[in-house]
Image (cartoon, rainbow, N blue to C red):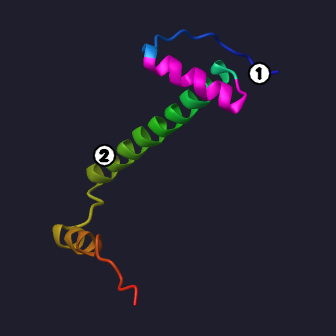
Amino acid sequence: MKKESMVSVRLSAELAARLEKLSRATDRSKSFLAAEAIEEYVALQEWQVEAIKDGIAAAERGDMASHDEAMAVLGQWGHRRNAA
C-alpha cells in the first residue's frame, strides 16, 4: 500500500461547485479528482523545469542553432498543405 499524505487547499466557490459536479458525473470522489489533477500538473511542471535546465545547459555549451537555422525552421511553421 502506498504511503499517503494529507493536503488541504482552498478553492473558490465556483471551482468547488464544478469539482462537486464532476465528482457526481464521474462517480469519483473529489479527493480522487483533485489528486489526479495535481499529479498531472506536477508532472507537467517537472517536465518543463527539466526542459529549461537542458536548454540552459545546451546554451552554456554553445550547442545552439544559428539565427539562420532557427529562422529556416520557424519559416516552416504555419504553412498549410493544399487539401486538394
Q: Is residue 39 above or below residue 58?
A: above
Residue in the image at 56% along x and 23% along y = 19
| Kind of residue at badge 2 | Ile
Report whether 45 appears left or right of 55: right
Q: Residues within 10 Å of mark 1 (few under 14, many from 20)?
A: few
Report whether 30 appears left or right of 76: right
Q: Where does residue 52 sit, x and y in percent of width and height? A: 35, 44
Q: Furthest-bottom residue in view? A: 84
| Kind of residue at badge 1 | Lys
Indicate the quadrant containing the N terminus: top left, top right, bottom left or bottom right.
top right
Between discs 1 and 2, the one toward the N terminus: 1
Could you say which is closer to the camera, residue 57 or residue 41? 41
Indicate the quadrant containing the C terminus: top left, top right, bottom left or bottom right.
bottom left
Q: Can you tell which mark lies on residue 56?
A: 2
Could you say which is closer to the camera, residue 38 or residue 82? 82
Residue in the image at 67% along x and 24% along y = 32
Could you say which is closer to the camera, residue 66 or residue 72? 72
The secondary structure type at the circle numbered 2 is: helix
Could you say which is closer to the camera, residue 79 or residue 73? 79
Give, as a single range, the part of the protein colored magenta. Answer: 14-28
The secondary structure type at the circle numbered 1 is: loop
The answer to whether the residue labelled 1 contacts the one labelled 2, judged by CB atoms less than 8 Å apart, is no
Q: Is residue 65 above or below residue 61?
A: below
Report whether 61 appears left or right of 66: right
Q: Can you tell which mark lies on residue 2?
A: 1
Q: Where does residue 71 sit, x and y in percent of width and height? A: 20, 70
